């Protein structure tokens, strides 16, 4: 059986190890949040009247897209409707957004049914004369890296919490035992 001094040392090691693993797990979890956040953007200018604006994406774009439309030089009496449509690599429609009565700034989120390859932004006003600045925010995700970060964060957090629990229990049991039996000096 272990000596009490050695058990105290083991309990402290478990506490320190548990604390480090828990912090590491939390950091990995926050890293996965940052990794999947929309850090990339593409901007374009939609001239009305004119041709629709096409925006092409890289491979690995996530299904959640953020958009920001800023209409300038639009008289108050003109109602501009904008249609944003997203398509996959086969050219199939996978989702979009219809913005009615764009005046000033419109922003929002679109969750798509698949991974987009390109977007087409087109106006629904043939007699309007304005400019719309379009900004699309997205994230590029390698799903293996995201799974590694998420799973690693979970495993390190659970292992760290178990180590903290076992180390704290061992420490408290030894402390309580020491209080029951005070050491006698001879």
Image (cartoon, rainbow, N blue to C red):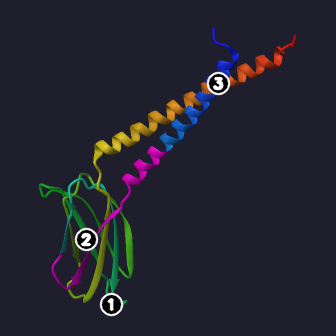
Q: Which mark is residue 150?
A: none
The C terminus: image quadrant: top right
Which residue carries the number 3 mark? 9
Q: Residue at x 18, y 59 (%)?
A: 117
Which residue of the protein is positioned furthest toward the left in this rendering? 90
Seen from the viewer's position, the closer of residues 113 and 22 is 22
90, above or below 155, in the image: below
Which residue carries the number 2 mark? 83
- Examine the rendering and report whether any part of residue 51 can be seen: yes
The mark lying in front, picked from 3 and 1, is: 3
Residues at marks 3 and 2 touching, judged by CB atoms closer than 8 Å: no
107, above or below 48, in the image: above
Seen from the viewer's position, the closer of residues 98 and 113 is 113
Q: Secondary structure at mark 3?
A: helix
Which residue carries the number 1 mark? 73
Distance CA(mark 3)–CA(mark 2): 66 Å
| Residue 44 counted in the magenta span | yes
The N terminus: image quadrant: top right
Which residue of the protein is positioned furthest toward the top in this rendering? 1
Q: Earlier in the sequence, mark 3 or mark 2?
A: 3
Distance CA(mark 2)–CA(mark 1): 19 Å
Question: Which residues lie in the magenta part?
Answer: 27-52
Q: Earlier in the sequence, mark 3 or mark 1?
A: 3
Say whether residue 186 is left or right of residue 130. right
Q: Earlier in the sequence, mark 2 or mark 1?
A: 1
Label 2 packing within 10 angstroms: few (<14), some (14-19), many (20+): some
Question: Where residue 78 sits: x, y (%)?
Answer: 31, 87
């Amino acid at each position: 059986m272990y000596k009490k001094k050695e058990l105290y040392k083991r309990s402290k090691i478990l506490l320190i190890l548990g604390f480090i693993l828990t912090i590491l797990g939390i950091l990995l979890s926050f890293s996965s949040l940052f990794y999947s956040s929309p850090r990339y953007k593409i901007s374009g200018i939609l001239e009305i009247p004119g041709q629709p604006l096409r925006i092409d994406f890289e491979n690995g774009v996530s299904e959640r897209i953020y958009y920001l439309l800023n209409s300038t030089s639009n008289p108050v009496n003109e109602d501009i409707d904008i249609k944003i449509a997203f398509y996959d690599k086969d050219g199939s429609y996978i989702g979009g957004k219809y913005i009615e009565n764009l005046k000033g700034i419109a922003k929002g989120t679109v969750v798509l049914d698949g991974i987009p390859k390109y977007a087409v932004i087109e106006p629904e006003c043939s007699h309007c004369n304005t400019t719309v600045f379009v900004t699309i925010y997205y994230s590029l995700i390698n799903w293996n890296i995201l799974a590694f970060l998420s799973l690693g964060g979970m495993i390190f957090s659970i292992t760290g919490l178990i180590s903290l629990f076992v180390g704290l229990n061992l420490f408290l049991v030894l402390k309580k035992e020491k209080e029951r039996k005070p050491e006698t000096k001879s």
